[in-house]
Image (cartoon, rainbow, N blue to C red):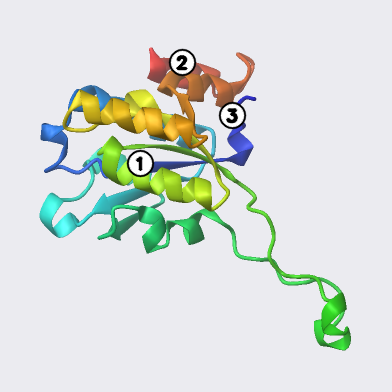
């Protein structure tokens, strides 16, 4: 099973200015998050950001924030507790044809539909807290979750690795930045192949 750009959304969790200096391998993790966001923009994949208690931890890295179409400020560790799921699921489409009130209730079709982009590619900090809790909630909400390991970290390597073990056990796919990029591309004939290649090299 490969990632499909047309079914994907990218969520970038808490790459905040006061948090990143304390993060294990922080500069490399942030660089990969930036690459992911740039590739997503080239591939027309929606990019969302989150910030944990930004009044205390500051905003996300400025360049990263600029690549997100929206950024959710949150106090819960899980962004799903603060409405991220509503951003990721399109609103239900109104029913077509006829007045629904003209049908008996048992014949009316529910307006809810499956998400159009139900594959969530997610990365962030700290891996064992905000990233973990957000990803687990998204899995529970029936999204397909792919965690980009080289764009995630915690203050310690042990906490980061424990998060990956738990996420894999819960059904998340563990991938790297380049795996995501080349699976979204699928072919060297993709019109943005050279632009993406320049980003990952």
Question: Vertical placement of 29 versus 140: above or below?
Answer: above
Mark 3 or mark 2: whose residue is earlier in sequence: 3
Question: Vertical placement of 70 versus 196: above or below?
Answer: below
Q: Where on the picture, by quarter, is residue 136?
A: top left
Query: On the image, numbered disc 1 is attached to which residue?
Result: 132
- The residue at the point 22 percent across, 33 percent down is 154
Disc 2, SS: helix
Q: Is residue 10 visible?
A: yes
Disc 1, SS: helix
Q: CA distance from mark 2 to mark 1?
A: 30 Å
Q: Is 42 or 14 nearer to us in this picture?
A: 14
Query: On the image, numbered disc 2 is attached to which residue?
Result: 197
Query: On the image, numbered disc 3 is attached to which residue?
Result: 3
Disc 3, SS: loop
In the visual, does 195 lie left or right of 66?
A: right
Mark 3 closeness class: few <14, some 14–19, many ≥20 residues within 10 Å:
some
Q: Is 170 or 107 nearer to us in this picture?
A: 170
Residue 76 in picture, x, y percent from top left: 29, 58
- Which residue of the protein is positioned furthest toward the bottom in this rendering? 102
């Amino acid at each position: 099973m490969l990632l499909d750009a047309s079914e994907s959304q990218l969520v970038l969790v808490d790459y905040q200015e006061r948090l990143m200096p304390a993060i294990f391998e922080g500069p490399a993790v942030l660089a990969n998050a930036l690459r992911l966001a740039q590739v997503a923009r080239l591939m027309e994949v929606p990019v969302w950001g989150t910030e944990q208690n930004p009044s205390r931890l500051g905003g996300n890295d400025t360049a990263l924030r600029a690549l997100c179409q929206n950024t959710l400020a949150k106090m819960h560790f899980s962004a799903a507790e603060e409405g991220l799921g509503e951003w990721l699921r399109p609103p239900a489409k109104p029913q077509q044809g006829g007045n629904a009130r003209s049908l008996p209730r048992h014949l009316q079709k529910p307006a809810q539909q499956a998400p159009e982009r139900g594959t969530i590619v997610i990365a962030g900090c700290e891996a064992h807290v905000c990233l973990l809790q957000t990803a687990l909630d998204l899995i529970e909400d029936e999204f397909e979750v792919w965690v980009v390991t080289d764009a995630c970290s915690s203050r310690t390597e042990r906490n980061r690795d424990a998060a990956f073990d738990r996420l894999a056990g819960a059904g998340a796919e563990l991938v790297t930045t380049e795996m995501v990029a080349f699976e979204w591309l699928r072919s060297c004939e993709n019109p943005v192949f050279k632009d993406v290649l320049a980003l990952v090299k």
